[in-house]
Image: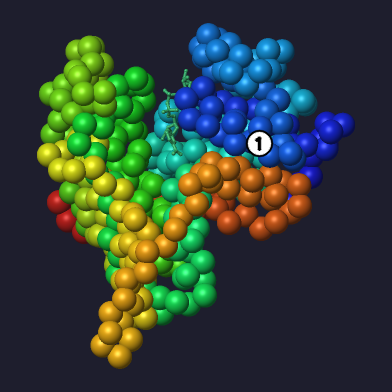
Amino acid sequence: MARRKRGKSGKVRVAIVGMGIGKANAKALQKNPRAEVAALCDLLPERMEAFAKELNLPGILRFTDYKEMCRDERIDAVFVGTPNQFHVPVALEAVRNGKHVLVTKPLADALAPARKLVKAAEAAKVVNMMSLSTRFGPGCRILGGYLARGEFGEVYYARARSVRRLGIPHWGLGFVRKGGGAWRDMGVHVLDAVWWLMGMPRPVSVLGVAGAKFGPRGEGYLGGRRPPKDYWSEYAADDYAGGFVRFENGAGVQVESFWASHQPEELQIELFGTQAGAKLSPLTIYRTHDYVTSNEAVEVPKETNGFDANTAHWVDCILDGVKCEAPLRHGLLVQEMMEALLDSAERGKEVRL
Ligand SMILES: NC(=O)c1ccc[n+]([C@@H]2O[C@H](COP(=O)([O-])OP(=O)(O)OC[C@H]3O[C@@H](n4cnc5c(N)ncnc54)[C@H](O)[C@@H]3O)[C@@H](O)[C@H]2O)c1
């Protein structure tokens, strides 16, 4: 792994790109004694201004041009939190300048740029990691522990879904334009997490349906009211998707994502194992011994969140050379499944990977 020079403090000096989800990640990094938020980058200076105040770092470096930021020697690592369509351009520039990267989900807005980025990041030998707040969330981490101890036996089937009722984002065109959509925004969370919990088997085929039933009509938006027409008339993405992924080991997962629907809200993962089963929300383990069934409710610590664990692992990888648990290559495999589902929906048949 390439080692970059660091500042006198020995801390990883991180630049945060994108003052949306970048803020939660910056706050998580600020809690980490081995990292410091050294720079902010956004097209909108007023967003950086407001966040610099919130962090109580009025003199922090600020950039509106990510290319200039990536050339700056005072930065070791970059968190990429731009809209989907700008993950690859920003992360590519960062790795080409030898910066470690943490890229928010999804890896990209399409498959070709995702492949290009993974190739460049691996060639640059920097720590390249996905930011996955669901996989690194406390519930999934606990479930991962049960799986690692073999308590589920063989996990042969799973269901994963993210369902919103009025949940279409209304504040960024990146969400509703090509490359955005519910599937890449929320489907990615549950697909990545369930695939990881199943032991990351190799996908072999995907069958799916997808479409936009609410967004293009100005319906189903977050906040419970219709945004201006010049926003929703740009709608060019899905607002729901669902399908089935088959894996090389014979296992399968049913996965769904809805930004808007006439259904109750839910973020759920259900695992079917030969020795036990589980569901994520609320975290429950189901077992049967000698025909006696038991349901174990598992307490999930409320004080931790996925961003703390995710950023802490990134810092450990950079400073200690720990093996990265969520490299961009994982994001690429998930992107392959996601794009195959959208492709299957368009072509009306199963897609083989
Ligand atoms: N749980 C999670 O991990 C999580 C949660 C929310 C969003 N996200 C992801 O974060 C990304 C952004 O979503 P958001 O909700 O933060 O959006 P947002 O619109 O609130 O924030 C994006 C910011 O990026 C800035 N930006 C856009 N293009 C830029 C560029 N070229 N250079 C610098 N800054 C640029 C915008 O000005 C804006 O401030 C999406 O890809 C989304 O999937 C992840």
Asked if one can make out residue 111 in the rendered structure from this viewpoint, the answer is: yes
- Residue sitting at 24 percent across and 39 percent down? 164
Q: Nearer the viewer, residue 263 or 41?
A: 263
Quadrant of res 56: top right
Residue tagged 1: 31
Callout 1: few (<14), some (14-19), or many (20+) C-alpha neighbours within 10 Å?
Answer: few
Residue 294 horizontal/vertical position (percent): 31, 76
Residue 187 position (above or below residue 44): below
Whole-percent x, y for residue 161 in the image: 27, 51
Please determine whether, in this image, residue 229 is positioned above or below residue 72: above
Location of residue 50 by image quarter: top right
The structure residue drawn at horizontal position 76% and vertical position 47%, both measured from the top left corner, is 319
Q: In the displayed image of the protein, which residue is found farthest to the right?
A: 8
User: Which quadrant does ligand 1 occupy?
Assistant: top left
Q: As shown in the figure, which amino acid type bears the numbered disc 1?
A: Lys
Residue 299: where, in percent of width, then height? 44, 58
Residue occupying the point 56% across, 34% down: 25
Q: Is residue 189 left or right of residue 57?
A: left
